[in-house]
Image (spheres, grey):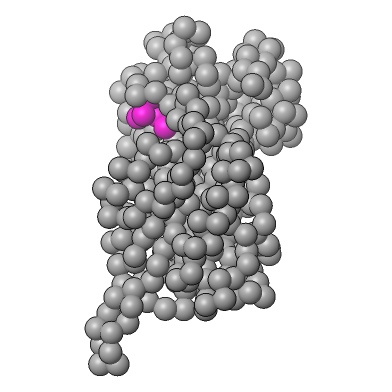
Amino acid sequence: MRFAVFDETKDGETRVALVPDAVKMLLKKQHAVSVQSGAGRAASIPDAQFADAGAQIAADAAGLAAVADCLLRVRPVTTGEAAGFPEGNAVIGFLAPLRNPELVSVLAARRITAFSLDAIPRISRAQSMDTLSSMATIAGYKAVLLAADALPKFLPMLTTAAGTIRPSQALILGAGVAGLQAIATARRMGAVVEAFDVRAAVKEQIQSLGATFLEIPNQENLEDKGGYAKQVSPETLAKTAAAFARARQGGGFHHHHRASARQTGPAPDHQGNGRGHETRLGHRGPGGGERRQLRIDAGGKTVCEHGVTIIGPTNLPARMPLDASRMFARNLANFILEITNEKGFTMDWKNEIFAATCVTHGGEITRKAP
């Protein structure tokens, strides 16, 4: 098959779907790769590196789409772009089908075979293809750096000529991939870290990173079969809010992350603690859930009247494009090798990975909303 890597058109998107090492992975399996000129520029990957890896460089997107069997993108294609794709073509990327029903309809109408990387199942065999986890790792790391920059004090404890400076306190809400990376990064930078998750099973993971687990007694099972946190009851939500208020008395910064539209876990209000400056960093992926109770201006940052700085970026991986592209590309290449063979796509609907990610095929929508 011939795969085509497009330049990303979404404002602020700096990642590229494949990097030279991933190109080589596909070429070894007798696939061919074409790359739109300049696609890797924002990620510091010039055309020459793609060419050296064996990719063909195409001048424009239109010519690229005409010769490719499958189009590769990081962010969702637009409905206009999809309408212009050759009928019967294929596309792989973060399509967010539940949030883009119009796009799914256009892809089906054009008989496009579409795969959405944000639907990769959480099974051990798919870990090497898990783009969401890879991007969440970057988001958790970058979030702490942004919080440290915005916080008007040091993170670590320091002994100086002016005396001892106490370390900052960090409250990490949610111990998924992003949260665990945020905990590890904050600890490495010297902060005193407390973390919370409605799933009691992650307590040991939090403690293994040197953080204190903020425990809230409840009788609910708050983890679904896929490992995601479930919506909490009003009673548990009230207990959680009270625990957050107590944990915030020391100031510092607070981090929470939503990468999926289905995530609606507890979030803090934006009232200050009355004891000095706080920094909140509530970020989400480009297709993530709503930022409830956070007031964000166009620049991604708002200083509220209660002494709280809120930072609300929506695409942290794009702020670290080289490693983000490397991680995304390795996951993508592993995914492509899983769903293809020497004849093209395997069309193996018994393969859980194939069936979960294929959104449209043969003019039909193959993955319905739950």
Closest to the observer: 26 or 147? Answer: 147
Considering only vertical position in the picture, is 189 above or below 274?
above
Residue at 26% x, 87% y: name it.
160
Residue 135 image offset from top left, x and y in percent: 44, 44
Confirm whether the magenta stretch covers residue 141.
no
Closest to the observer: 184 or 58? Answer: 184
Q: Which residues are magenta?
A: 126-130
Closest to the observer: 310 or 89? Answer: 310
Residue 96 image offset from top left, x and y in percent: 61, 33
Number of numbered callouts drawn? 0
**In the picture provided, is 299 more to the left or to the right than 52?**
right
Residue at 47% x, 7% y: name it.
350
Q: Quadrant of the C terminus?
A: top right
**In the picture provided, is 102 more to the left or to the right than 128?**
right
Residue at 25% x, 92% y: name it.
161
Confirm whether the magenta stretch covers residue 129.
yes
Considering only vertical position in the picture, is 274 above or below 368?
below
Residue 63 image offset from top left, x and y in percent: 60, 32
On the question of residue 34 being in view, the answer is no
Q: Main secondary structure of the magenta part?
A: helix
**In the picture provided, is 238 more to the left or to the right than 14?**
right
Considering only vertical position in the picture, is 331 above or below 302?
above
On the question of residue 165 being in view, the answer is yes
Residue 116 image offset from top left, x and y in percent: 55, 27
Closest to the observer: 12 or 195? Answer: 195
Residue at 41% x, 63% y: name it.
170
